[in-house]
Amino acid sequence: MKTGLLTVICLIITLTAVAAQAARFVRYEAQGQVNYGEVVGDTVYELSGSYLAGAERTGTQHELASVTLQLPVDPGEVSKILGTAVNTKRPTLSLPENPHPRWFAKFPSSLNPDGGGVMLPPEAENLNYEGELVVVIGKTARHVTEDRALDYVFGYTVGNDFSENTWYGERKGREEPARLISKGSDTWACLGSEVVTDIDYRNRRLVTRLNNEIVQDGNTNDLIQDVPELIAYVSRYITLEPGDLIYTGTVLFKEDARRKMQIGDELEVAIEGIGRVRSTIVPMFASGQ
């Protein structure tokens, strides 16, 4: 009886310690200024600079509801955004015995904050969404080994990787844009408002909703190439810098859930314990775009 009680107490202490270690970081606008901050409960504590540079609290704080959350990374300080195609387990997926990650690139101009409009070009025939776990690099990484890869991760956030899947195949030559544009167009890298650190990204439910209906329901354990392998592989060839983002791959779609986007469609991607990002499909040439 005493042994069982002791076990329960130890488990509670362990879970409390793990929860206490997790931190949430944001960029926000308050009183006309954009700052970095750390969120604790319903309070944002202003930081002296970027959390990626180890900034400390200044003593200024705000109610979370009183600030406007921005992209959690400054697009002007992001050197690269990388993503992997076909990187989650699916019943009908056929791949080589030892597949390498199929990398693509997006750009700082592709970044789109929570609540942003995703531009739909009039010539697009098959714009689509993909809810994903996104890795935020915290330290310069080159020739990193898998067993050390997570040491270079600052934290995690949630993303929605939009792409024009017809263009991705580059089958029609000059009649349609190339693969680079099919993935890297403006507004097509949606990103949640918070970066969560000191957590285990594994075994977390990922759900995408289209107009409030669940269209993707998967788990971060569904990755074929896991986060350490992705970092180790790409850092052999490309130097990763603090603030770089890796979209790790989407999860399985529900049957018949995938369709081309229409103006007014609303999407939300949520990852358990990490956050969410919401988007609305808008015309490419809408006023102000």
Image (cartoon, rainbow, N blue to C red):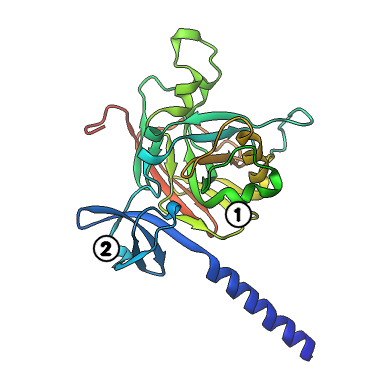
Mark 2: give few (<14), some (14-19) or many (20+) Cα within 10 Å: few
Please report the residue visible at 50 percent of the width from the left and 9 percent of the height from the top.
173
On the rendered structure, is 4 left or right of 156?
A: right
Q: Are marks 1 and 2 in contact (CB under 8 Å)?
A: no
Q: Amino acid at mark 2?
A: Ser
Q: Position of residue 192 (x, y in %)?
A: 43, 49
Q: Which residue is mark 2?
A: 66
Q: In the image, what residue occupies the spot 54% across and 40% down?
A: 246
In this picture, residue 173 sits left or right of residue 278: right
- Can residue 192 be seen here? The reply is yes
- Asked which secondary structure carries label 1, the reply is loop
Residue behind mark 1? 201
- Residue 4 in the image: state x and y as whole percent: 77, 85
Q: CA distance from mark 1 to mark 2?
A: 29 Å
Which is nearer the eye, 88 or 211? 88
The residue positioned 53% from the left and 64% from the top of the image is 22
The quarter in which the C terminus is drawn is top left
User: In percent of the image, x 38 and y 19: which residue is there?
Assistant: 123
Which image quarter holds the N terminus?
Answer: bottom right
Report whether 256 appears left or right of 94. Answer: left
Is residue 265 visible in this depiction of the protein? no
